[in-house]
Image (tube, rainbow, N blue to C red):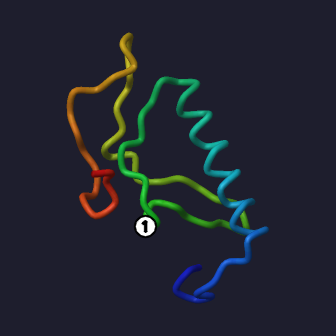
Amino acid sequence: MLRKDRIIPEKQALLIFKQLIDAFQVLNKYNIMHRDLKPDNIFFNQGVVKLGDFGFCKSLEKANMTKTMLGSPIYMAP
């Protein structure tokens, strides 16, 4: 979408962001950490945002913490 349109209107960006938040609320409900959120892992299907690539996911059992650091370095926080 970014490659095609180059600019996403604010209203549309907020709708996309809300759908991502909804996806992370579901993951949080099941104590799952995605650990690789980046534009390449956000998909669109008929206007619906889908979160994909769960290869680095981690189930958070009790402490809600993980001792490993995974993800795509270019998108990781410093």
Q: Is 20 or 7 nearer to us in this picture?
A: 7
Residue 23: percent from left, percent from top: 61, 43
Residue 52 sits above or below residue 33 on the image: below
Q: How many marks?
A: 1
Left or right for 68, reference 64: left
Which quarter of the rendered picture does the N terminus lie within? bottom right
Residue found at x 47% / y 54%: 52
Q: Residue furthest right?
A: 11
Left or right for 45, reference 58: right
Residue 58, quarter of picture: top left
Q: Residue furthest front?
A: 78
Residue 76 sits above or below residue 28 on the image: below
Three-letter code, disc 1: Asp
Residue 43 sits above or below residue 54 on the image: below
Residue found at x 27% / y 51%: 78
Q: Is 70 or 30 nearer to us in this picture?
A: 70
Q: Is 39 or 14 nearer to us in this picture?
A: 14
Q: Residue furthest left?
A: 68
For label 1, the residue is 40
Residue found at x 38% / y 26%: 59
What crowding class fits label 1: few (fewer than 14 Cα within 10 Å), some (14-19), or many (20 or more)? few
Element marked by disc 1:
helix
Residue 70, quarter of picture: top left
Residue 62 sits above or below residue 74 on the image: above
